[in-house]
Image (spheres, rainbow, N blue to C red):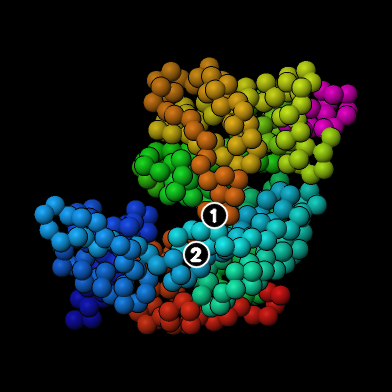
Amino acid sequence: MDARRTTVRDMRRANRSLLLTRIWLDGPLSRHELGQSTALSLASVSNLVGEMIAEGIVEEAGSVDSDGGRPRVLLRVAPGYGYLVGADVGETRVQVELFDLAMTALAKAEYPIAAAEPDPQRVAEHLLHGLTAVVEQAGIDPGAVLGFGVAVSGTVERTADAVVHAQTLGWEGVPLGAMLRSGTDIPVHLDNGAKTLGQAEMWFGAGRGSRHAVIALVGSGIGASVVADGVGYRGAHSSAGEWGHTTIVYGGRRCRCGNLGCLEAYVGAEGVLDRFRLANRGRPVAGGDEESAFSELLRSSSRTAAKVLDETVGYLGAGVATLVNLFNPERVVLGGWAGLALGERYLPQIRAATARHALRQPYAQTSIELCQLGPDAVAMGAATLPMARLLRDGGVPRVPGVARETATPPRQARRPRSRTR
């Protein structure tokens, strides 16, 4: 009997998860549309949707005319049921944003990073301060925050401590997850920044509708998120997608990782600016931070800048061709702040350079597009990490120490500790 009850309970949670995911990603939807797209009976749909409406996670959102019958009521995930916080730990700054469940940005905080190899403890402090700051800016109860997603460089071990290995930052085995959890009771989720960018673009942006895609992140560093048959490919230990550290020039420029000839050394913003400095007789691009200097380089009318940028487009095209040849994606999506800056000006040239280096048939089967969610997409993707957990659990939030079947609704969850201030 117990085994049978467990099976029924698990099936019910799986069906709730299926419905809630469809409503969140594709809503507003009617009960009829949910039944058609999930193959669940209308009675099951009505029953489970009724539960979720009573819990407040789903709400009615108007109606549409039906063919000859009564208007159909549309359903959506209630935007104010809870809130999501996402953070992007970049090379030059920590950015923290708060969203409602409609993924509307409600508050934002930024903290600059000056050091090439930032101190992990200092980064953790920025993240915790940012968490408190955005909650206070939005004027919400901290107990309504469903989770805090954090995107970082490098590999994130999917353990309780969420250990980070970021060779280019000098981070070896940094237990960033444990460091953050010691300062807040809000659930913390960590992942690689390229992977969070990929999730955001696949759910809401340029990757939507494709089953096989690569989302490429080009900023100070370079990474990629590989999606195969609708599922993100992580590799044996979550380090898949380190595209920036594939060798593009044998014995070439030294990369920040210590190796020679990595793609990142030629196409990452730091590498591009350094290549310009060397070509310009040691004179760097005028500008303050890295992003300002990169923008200035793109605006420059000098022949040296034009030559460096032309070479950069060629290297980037060769790198994208490697992705095309290896993974045969339907779509390659170019993002990251530097990738968007290059793509907005040179996308036709990037496509042409890719065509020169890729095999003809896989290239003909691939489209190369720009990210649609803008330079803040990494933080948005990080915010989807706790939402993905809520969707998998069928809308039952996981509260430490409480059985999932009787978990407290998010507005009654524990508040962050004062150390977040």
Q: Where residue 243 sits in the image (x, y, percent)?
A: 58, 37
What secondary structure prevails in the magenta region?
helix
State the quadrant of the C terminus: bottom right
Quickly name the residue at label 1.
380
The answer to whether any part of residue 259 appears in the image is: no
Q: Is residue 288 magenta?
A: no
- Check whether the beta carbons of the residues at disc 2 and disc 1 lie within 8 A of each other: no
Q: Residues within 10 Å of mark 1 (few under 14, many from 20)?
A: many
Q: CA distance from mark 2 to mark 1?
A: 11 Å
Find the magenta span and give its range. Answer: 271-285
Q: Where residue 184 sits in the image (x, y, percent)?
A: 62, 75
Quickly name the residue at label 2.
100
Image position of 243 with respect to 402: above or below: above
State the quadrant of the N terminus: bottom left
Which one is closest to the eye, mark 2 or mark 1?
Answer: 2
**First in sequence: mark 2 or mark 1?**
2
Q: In the image, 334: left or right of 212?
A: right
